Image: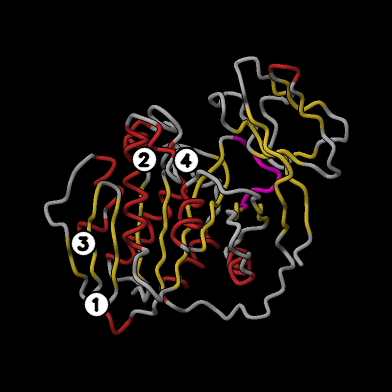
Amino acid sequence: MLALGRLLELTLAGREPAEKIQLTQAGVRLHWLAEGALEVTPPASDDDGFDLLLSAGIHGNETAPIELLDSLLQSIAGGHFKPRVRLLFLLGNPPAMRRGERFIDQDINRLFNGRHADASGYEALRACELERLAANFFSQPGRTRLHYDMHTAIRGSQIEQFALYPYSPERLHSRLELARLQAAGITAVLLQSKVGITFSSYTYACLDAEAFTLELGKARPFGQNKGVNLQQLEDHLQSLIEGTEASLDGQVLDVLQLFQVAREVIKHSDAFRLHLPADVENFSELPLGYLLAEDIAGTRWIIEEPGARIIFPNPKVKNGLRAGLLVVPVSVD
């Protein structure tokens, strides 16, 4: 297997490869762009006009999707299957991956869409670099653009594998992409209601890509992910890469549940209190009238939406950031 196929090994060791460009026997080019960044280009005769960005490790302790990308890349570098799409593999936060921690100084997934310009430290620099790498990759006109930013959660979830669909006021949701997610084993999609500051929000709003944050189970250390079943996702990604994806025209979205963001819970001060158990799971339903959170100046979040559920509750975020999302179910139609 080509040395560049061991991107994860190089990244965890903090090594720069001696050769930056290598070719497989089938003429597929592997190009090391920066730490944790590798571009894969098929021969022009095999190119289906599809650009696929696969990112993981934005949080360094979310290892299952990192291992998934490693498996796909090693299969390509070893000649086990041949891509018909351009690919960009990105391992988002290498120093945090090496430490087995979520981040070094701050959450990198709150620094996109220009937020890194108002921050300092490693994660701010890396967010800027990831934006540049993604923008360069998606710069060729007339091509299909898709980005999956893959994560695992710090807590359990009543719906284990779900996606977040970014928002842009100028764009409509794609039924084809929802069908793709269903085929990949995703069982719920959260439709966001404002432009975000995550990596997928940046590629969706600024680079005209279809983009999703995928939550794929609970975070575990490297080598301990047998409890995270990503086989359906891996099989579907391989079909996308090989250009063998089955037709999804008219696909019935009978498994997929859709949710819409009703409200964000923003932590304004150190006085913020979230009235939930520390081990509460994502998608836990909250009763009407429930006092969810309190903050300074008498700020209170009381549940007013029938069927409301909590996503990503985290009272330890920095002041000014989101400490949770309230979502409600909506019709697929």
- Tell me, yes or no, whether the highlighted magenta stretch contains residue 159: yes
**Going from the N terminus, do you reach mark 3 or mark 4 first?**
3
Residue 93 numbered mark, or none: 2
Residue type at mark 3?
A: Leu
Cα–Cα span, label 2 and label 3 = 23 Å
Residue 2 numbered mark, or none: 3
Secondary structure category for the residue under label 2: loop
Q: Which residues are magenta?
A: 155-162
- Tell which tag, 2 or 3, sits nearer the viewer: 2
Residue at (68, 33) in percent of width and height:
265
Cα–Cα span, label 2 and label 1 = 31 Å
Residue at (71, 44) in percent of width and height:
158
- The residue tagged 1 is 26
- Tell which tag, 1 or 4, sits nearer the viewer: 4
x and y percent of residue 99 in the render? 35, 31
Secondary structure category for the residue under label 4: helix
Residue at (29, 84) in percent of width and height:
45
Marks 2 & 3, CB-CB < 8 Å contact: no
Cα–Cα span, label 3 and label 4 = 31 Å
Cα–Cα span, label 3 and label 1 = 12 Å
* In the foreground, 262 or 50: 262
Neighbours of disc 4 within 10 Å: few (<14), some (14-19), many (20+): many
The quadrant where residue 246 appears? bottom right
